[in-house]
Amino acid sequence: MVKNSNDEKIKQSLMAAHLYYEENKGQSEIANQLGISRPTVSRLLQQAKQLGFVKIQIENPLLDAKELENLLNKKYHATIKVVPTNYRNKTAIFDSVGAYTADYLMKIVKPGDIIGIGWGKTIHAVTNQLEKQSVKDVRVVQLKGSVSIGECEETYAYESINELAYAFNTKANYLPLPTIFDNQLTRELVEQDRFIKDVLELGRKANIALFTVGTVRKEALLFQQGYLNEDQKAELQLHAVGDVVSRFIDSKGQIVNNELNNRTIGIELEELKAKDSSIIIASGLGKVAGVHTVLSSGYANLGIFDSALAHKGGN
């Protein structure tokens, strides 16, 4: 018996819609999985809307975002920017927060500013959406060590600082070192090097800092880099809410493991408080606890978040 071709198209349309809207897969990825072309995926998604399989509700998120900003500004005594992201595709949400932050950064940077940045996918979502600027005498610097010692997910450390440097017509100041050294003495000796000392000092002088907060889930980037043994990971998962510039903190904003922290190179948490603009950017509900702690502890005076994360933070 030959199957009805229309039924097959409907099934394919449903599958494409499921993969796109519920599993957050891109159209190219769906095309590869289903063995069809990307334009066909686009047509299937359009068909899913036309047949009523997918219903998109348009709301006015701007008013909601403004209310959230006012609530969070008062709660944390900081400037909070909420990016309206009332849709389910995680990649789209991530990119929207990155684009908003890139636009914000391009507006506030002025001649003579020093911008210090962390690294990771969140930071790269900002820097890869920056446009070429005409602001003079801007300097950019990495705020923490940027070399991985194990096989892990891409940190985008060099891409991010290079994109930032390109946007502001300046050179990148790298900190080409392990994030965490084997022992404190080695870290202290390395910091005596004239080049390293100058880069660290530039990070301290930065009047703008851009960073995110990591998690302590098993897939966390720092957990994949080969610096931590299983006992250390277990301790951090038990006591820490996340990391800020690779320094793990508890729910009160205090360092969790001092021995580990003493082996970590880069800007200190207290130094973030002295910045004119200490900006935390985050997306995703997995970062709620970390964001709350960073803002409550005063490590950031400005936060940029997606609306779902902001809603949780406002509760």
Image (tube, rainbow, N blue to C red):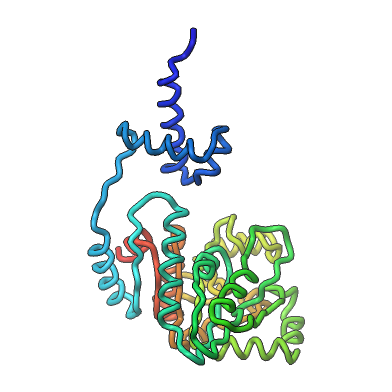
Q: Residue at x 65, y 59 (%)?
A: 224
Residue 240 is at least partly visible in this image:
no
Q: Nearer the viewer, residue 98 or 267?
A: 98
Q: Residue at x 45, y 88 (%)?
A: 110
Direction top: furthest residue:
1
Up-down: is 243 above or below 78? above
Question: Residue 180 in the image: x percent, y percent?
Answer: 68, 73
Up-down: is 123 above or below 88? below
Does residue 310 appear to the left or right of 12 in the view shown?
Answer: left
Question: Residue 260 in the image: x percent, y percent?
Answer: 65, 74
Does residue 98 appear to the left or right of 53 in the view shown?
Answer: right
Marker count (numbered): 0
Up-down: is 63 above or below 204? above
Does residue 171 appear to the left or right of 11 in the view shown?
Answer: right
Q: Nearer the viewer, residue 52 or 260?
A: 52
Does residue 207 appear to the left or right of 72 in the view shown?
Answer: right
Rendering quarter of residue 64: bottom left
Q: Nearer the viewer, residue 184 or 215?
A: 215
Residue 20 is at least partly visible in this image:
yes
Question: Residue 55 in the image: x percent, y percent?
Answer: 30, 40
Quadrant of the frame with the C terminus: bottom left
Question: Residue 61 in the image: x percent, y percent?
Answer: 27, 59
Rendering quarter of residue 175: bottom right
Q: Residue at x 42, y 57 (%)?
A: 93
